[in-house]
Amino acid sequence: MEMTIFGTDAVPVNQKKQAKKPLIVGIAAVAVVAVTFLIILASSKKTAEGFTVLNTNKSVYSPNEMAVILISTTDKEGKTLCHSNLEVMVTGPDKTNIGLSTENEMLPTSTTCAEDGTVTNNPDYQSGFVPKLEGIYKIKLTNLDTNAVIEKKIGVKKDIDFNIERQTTTRLNPSETVRYHMVLKIFSKNNFKGQVVETIPSSIKIAWVGEAKLEAEKITWGVDIKAGETKELIYDYVNPTTELKIYDFGPASMSIGSRRVFAETSSWQGINAYATK
């Protein structure tokens, strides 16, 4: 299995050759996508020692497209942790493994991670790989400090009819005024005229939805996409709740009339973290 991490060759973990240090790029926290054959086993874990969440920027990718891994961790009091001991193992469809970890510097801490609770729209840890083969890739995250284990799957295929990409934070600080942005990037291979529906957590307050329709725990957009185009849908939200918890945004779906043509198979997860200032 050929994989690339941030444009450099990745080394399978069963080889003794030292891996090259990846090029660190400022990738904003982004998104989850779905296709029917994908199954997300888990994307968050709470232990007595704290919280850990794992997201990928999509659930399905084209070959040679970077798959971005986005992580946040907190202690049991909700304090942001920027020096967690994390390990990610990626297993490809040919059973070859590669390892990304904070120890080997292939899972770096974001420059915007701050243990004082500074607000950010970026993940606290991020890495990635470029899959070459079609098929299912398994991602297993282990928080070696808490023994939390999170597993999920992504798919790689050449012909993708629909795709949804999310861009938002993986960590939310309680505030009545601080706004976070959610960006949904909607792709359609063919002309699409219909609705996109987003599910929002009950304790999240929506601050702005533009021309979308907001009702209960749902946002609906009327969307017209030309073949091959990507359309951005944006809303702003506020996190007023101080309860330590993990939020689930989505899954989002695409419909034409009463017929659903696409739906995410998992939600985007963020930790409700306390600011310590």
Image: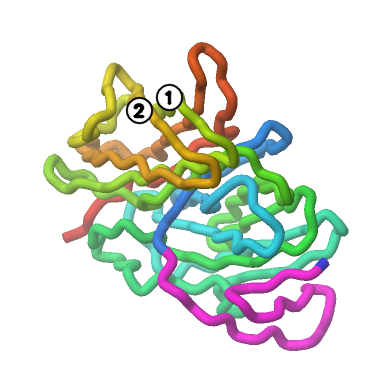
The residue that appears at 35% across and 22% down in the rendered structure is 218
Residue at left offset 66%, top offset 43%: 160
Residue 17 among magenta residues: yes
Label 1: which residue?
195
Question: Which image quadrant is residue 141 in?
Answer: bottom right
Q: Which residues are magenta?
A: 2-27
Residue 266: in sight, yes or no? Answer: yes
Q: Amino acid at mark 1?
A: Gln
Q: Position of residue 232 (x, y in %)?
A: 37, 45
**In terms of secondary structure, what is the magenta stretch mainly?**
loop
Point out the tag, 1 or 2, that comes first from the N-terminus: 1
> What is the spatial separation of the Cα atoms under label 1 and label 2, in whole angstroms?
6 Å
Question: Disc 1 vs disc 2: Cβ atoms closer than 8 Å?
Answer: yes
Tell me the crowding category of disc 2: few under 14, some 14 to 19, or many 20 or more residues within 10 angstroms, Cα based. Answer: some
Q: Give the label on residue 221, or none.
A: 2
The residue depicted at 39 percent of the width and 63 percent of the height is 81
User: Considering the numbered disc 1 on the image, is that residue within a helix, a strand or a loop?
Assistant: strand
The single residue placed furthest to the top in the displayed view is 258
Q: Is residue 140 left or right of residue 84?
A: right
Residue 253's x, y, as percent?
Answer: 50, 28
Residue 6 sits in which quadrant? Answer: bottom right
Q: Is residue 167 above or below residue 189?
A: below
Q: Residue 133, which numbered label?
A: none
Q: Quadrant of the N terminus?
A: bottom right
Give the color scheme: rainbow, by chain, secondary structure or one colour: rainbow
- The spot of residue 7 in percent (x, y) is 61, 77
Q: Which amino acid type is shown beneath numbered disc 2?
A: Trp
Tell me if 184 is positioned left or right of 204 in this view. right
